[in-house]
Image: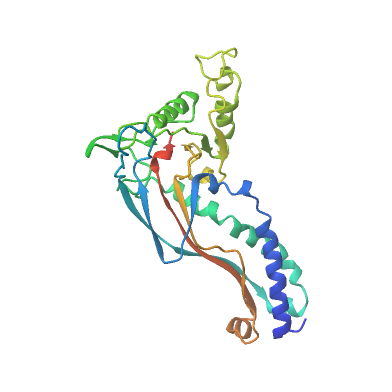
Amino acid sequence: MFLQSSTLAAARVGFDRIFQEGYQAITQADLWWMQLASARPSTDKSNIYHLLKLMPRMRKWVGARILHNLSMADYTLVNEPYEDGFEIDVDDFEDDKLGIYDDGLRQMGRAAALWGNDIIYTALVAGSTQLCYDGQYFFDTDHPLVVAGSADTVQVNLHATTALTAANYATTYQTMIARKGEDGKPLNIVPNLLIVPPSLKFTGLRIVKAVNAGYLMNASSTAADDNILRGTAEVLVIPELETDSSSTWYLADASKPVKPFIFQQRRLPNRIDVLNKPTDSNVFNERVVKVGCDGRGAAGYALWQLIDKCTA
């Protein structure tokens, strides 16, 4: 294959086709970020979100309609660039050996499709040090509860010395159910997703799947006792969590229209770019063709009330 404009242009079409094979191979089941984050389009450098501090509820209509003055908080999320790519030696064009790059192109397409997982994972594990709309860390021990204009108490969604056991799971579950809004009433939070690293997978499955309490390895239980925690949540295993902490786990209510996190999408990395003209400096001077994909977006924090973090 001679290195000329027509052959390079044809190669670019082939590169993109193979990249798309990897990109399209990812299914919705692979995209666990969709359970934890709301996708929000972006058309500018940043987005400003107006987050409701109160989850409204219906009331019996007696007399004139009551229009609630819903308290809101502004949260700004700035888009950032992300990229991936590699180089192809010009000699491989001339020797017609481009097939050796097929697997790399497919893998790049797969990585691009999984970008949402990566960006939400980063926000998840950083939540103990990043601020959310109320000025506290997203995972914190002192989120202020403002009722009737007075911050009279605090609420917790970060629990230390809380290893994944049936008892600790039940306590965290009850804490989330009892969580209140600014009207002083429970927010109707019902946890349904237990998030664990691989090393806690089977512990989590025993807690929410075992029929008998004896399988929970609880000294006060017998094999004949029913497991009252069965069916209270599904288990989501995130392999990357093993490198963060093999004993940290999370409990979330992923059933609401609003999710705990925001995946802001300015531009998805769903196509490749190729510097492949014979006159491109990388081709002329370095004897390489550069192939890459890039996107712009951000991961941020929505409602801390919907997820709790537990550390052992």
Q: Position of residue 130 (x, y in %)?
A: 37, 50
Residue sitting at x 68%, y 74%: 12
- Report whether 95 appears left or right of 173: right
Residue 21 or residue 88, whichever sits in front: 21
- Does residue 257 lie above or below 180 as drawn? below
- Does residue 11 lie above or below 266 as drawn? below
Q: Position of residue 134 (x, y in %)?
A: 31, 46
- Does residue 99 lie above or below 150 as drawn? below
Q: Residue furthest left?
A: 150
Residue sitting at x 43%, y 39%: 306
Q: Position of residue 107 (x, y in %)?
A: 66, 59
Number of marks: 0
Residue 33 or residue 44, whichever sits in front: 44
Residue sitting at x 58%, y 35%: 201
- Where residue 98 sits, quadrant-wise, is bottom right
Residue 221 or residue 300, whichever sits in front: 300
- Report whether 220 appears left or right of 131: right
- Where residue 60 sits, quadrant-wise, is top left
Q: Position of residue 64 (x, y in %)?
A: 30, 38
- Does residue 276 lie above or below 62 as drawn? below
